[in-house]
Image (spheres, rainbow, N blue to C red):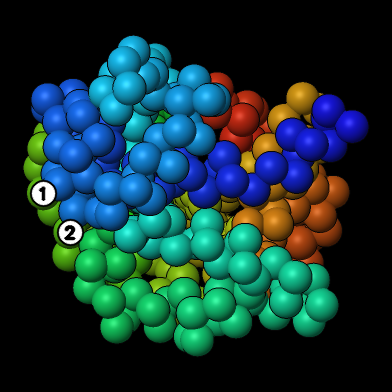
Amino acid sequence: MNDIRQMIDIFSPIALRVAATLRLADHVAAGADTLDELAKAAKVDADALRRLLRFLTCRGVFAEPSPGRYTLTGSAALLAADHPSRLREFLDLDTAGGRMDLAVCGGLLHTVRTGEAGYEAVFGQSFWDDLDTRPDLAGSFTALMTAVSRRLGPEVAAGYDWRDARHVVDVGGGAGFLLSAVLQRCPQARGTLVDLPATVARAQSTLDAAGVADRCAVQGGSFFDPLPEGGDVYVLSHVLHDWDDGPALSILRNCAAAAAATGGRVLVAERVIADDEHRALATEYDLRMAAIFGGARERSYDEFVTLAAAAGLAPGGVWHTSSQHWLMEWLPTT
């Protein structure tokens, strides 16, 4: 019963996200440590805030050394905006990441019943349409993806053997953080960044800051269209899990065709559902992708093998990063 009670607790995850959204840790750290001061700083109802803080202090997130006066614990410090974990950004319910969490909570039942995205059932439109109509959400999603790329880029650069790579093509590479990390590690290589025009417009400053702009071309385009040929390695990082098998196969086929033209290869960086210590996290992300996007999914390695074979690709090597991502190399068969 104790184990199942912990699993069915819905208030702790939501209460922590509310505290992060209201920036309670930052307000307390700035000196607003009484209930009235904190309610004024956060612009919330004082009685409702008292009840929220009572719940969180019982769980060690905040401390209450005297009635109505609050201090930070180690857990609360993680919610500060300047904490290097950037956890607050991921929990903020006013951002794209927060709305994705709400979509999972409110829409998973709809997804399991219908196979469709739960996000639309909760918010009345798809995730991408939501971003199109809410510039604030679009900006927060860009920041979220930037944080992921900043963290994963160096891992991909360090985790794969790039010694014979003279031309690296990052397909769906966003603002260029991953490609920048690879080019910094590989002074012999040049790069091409491919993504939608509005996305790659942000890449120049990233490449300039990394000191690799003179070795990198930026091309606006879709990975559903033919890709530039001449690459030694075509990188797909966090791309295929956004798509069901049909679209994912089209993306892989385009990469395979471009790579085959010059004897290149395809490198896929994704979470993989496997029988290992990371299985619980990978299955969590799988449900998250289903609830938010519908057909999107995390895959097992066997599923990647099947998908790659249909695209004309055979398995090469496999490497693992410290953040539980797999680096899977695929070689054209034609």
- Find residue 61 and report its horizontal and vertical position in percent: 45, 25
Q: Residue furthest right?
A: 1
Provide the secondary structure element on which disc 2 rests: loop
Q: Is residue 10 visible?
A: yes
Could you say which is closer to the camera, residue 49 or residue 168?
A: 49
- Find residue 132 and report its horizontal and vertical position in percent: 31, 81
Q: Which residue is mark 1?
A: 205
Could you say which is closer to the camera, residue 190 or residue 67?
A: 67
- For the residue marked with disc 2, what is the amino acid? Arg
Q: Is residue 312 visible?
A: no
- For the residue marked with disc 1, what is the amino acid? Ser
Q: Which residue is mark 2?
A: 202
Q: Quadrant of residue 303?
A: bottom right
- Find residue 121 and report its horizontal and vertical position in percent: 60, 82
Could you say which is closer to the camera, residue 105 or residue 15?
A: 15
Q: Are marks 2 and 1 in contact (CB under 8 Å)?
A: yes
Residue ID at (40%, 83%): 129
Q: Quadrant of the C terminus?
A: bottom right
